[in-house]
Image (cartoon, rainbow, N blue to C red):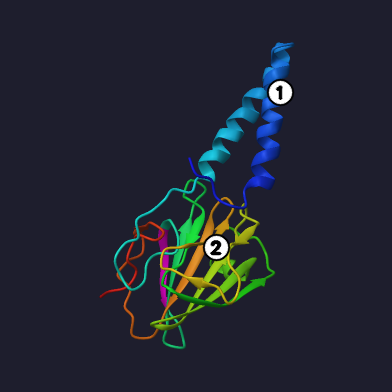
Amino acid sequence: MRLARGVSPWLLPTAATAAVTVLLTRRNRRWALAAVPLSALTGGMLWFFRDPDRTPGHGRVLSPADGVVQSIDPWPDGRTRVAIFMNPLNVHVNRAPLAGNVTSVQHVAGGFLPAFNKDSDQNERVVWHFETALGDIEMVQIAGAVARRIVPYLSAGAKVEQAERIGLIRLGSRVDLYLPEGITPAVSVGDKTVAGVTRIDHG
């Protein structure tokens, strides 16, 4: 099973501690009190940080995240924001919605409200801008109450293919995608999305 880049600081210490307690259990069964939950936590983290290969879907704009469409909002400048909520069971690796060039990757400090909270717009986040065939596309990775670490895989100046892996939000949260003026969403609130596969725009 392929694991996401950027998980080592969390996974390796947990797995190593679990392995040590399992070995100690052979000497004293009381160590099982620690070995069992630590082994379960390691297994859970392996699941949380999985990074399956995907065959890209068809469409001008593909979903950047696995999750559920939380809201679709018209923006004052004519764009439409599609917010995708990622729960801890979703794949946490985000993908490029279009092919193009990364023009900026900006980390913005903020709070850690639950991602479903309407004020989570002010959470810790990473703001991406892509120069694409549709013009400038903005995407925002937003940390939540549990997910407090966003790991970008690319930096400004990088060329990116559609559905390429671009970053990780540990343990879920939210990803906002801003569709340019004139682009109508092909998804509705409550729809499930798959990163790099689900089409977001109407053709």
Q: Position of residue 100 (x, y in %)?
A: 45, 76
The mark that comes first in sequence, 2 or 1, is: 1
Q: Is residue 95 magenta?
A: no
Type of secondary structure dominating the magenta stretch: strand
Residue designated by label 1: 21
Q: Which residues are magenta?
A: 68-73
Looking at the rendered image, the quarter that the C terminus falls into is bottom left
Considering depth in this image, is 30 or 165 the residue closer to the camera?
A: 165
Classify mark 1: residues with Cα within 10 Å, few (<14), some (14-19) or many (20+).
many
Residue at (43, 68) in percent of width and height: 161
For this orientation, the residue located farthest to the left is 203
Q: Position of residue 124 (x, y in %)?
A: 65, 66
Residue 126: image quadrant is bottom right
Residue at (60, 75) in percent of width and height: 156
Residue designated by label 2: 117
Residues marked 2 and 1 touching at CB (< 8 Å):
no
- Name above or below for residue 116 compared with residue 134: above
What's the residue type where badge 1 is placed?
Thr
What's the residue type where badge 2 is placed?
Asn
Secondary structure of the residue carrying tag 2 is: loop
Classify mark 2: residues with Cα within 10 Å, few (<14), some (14-19) or many (20+).
few
Residue at (69, 47) in percent of width and height: 9
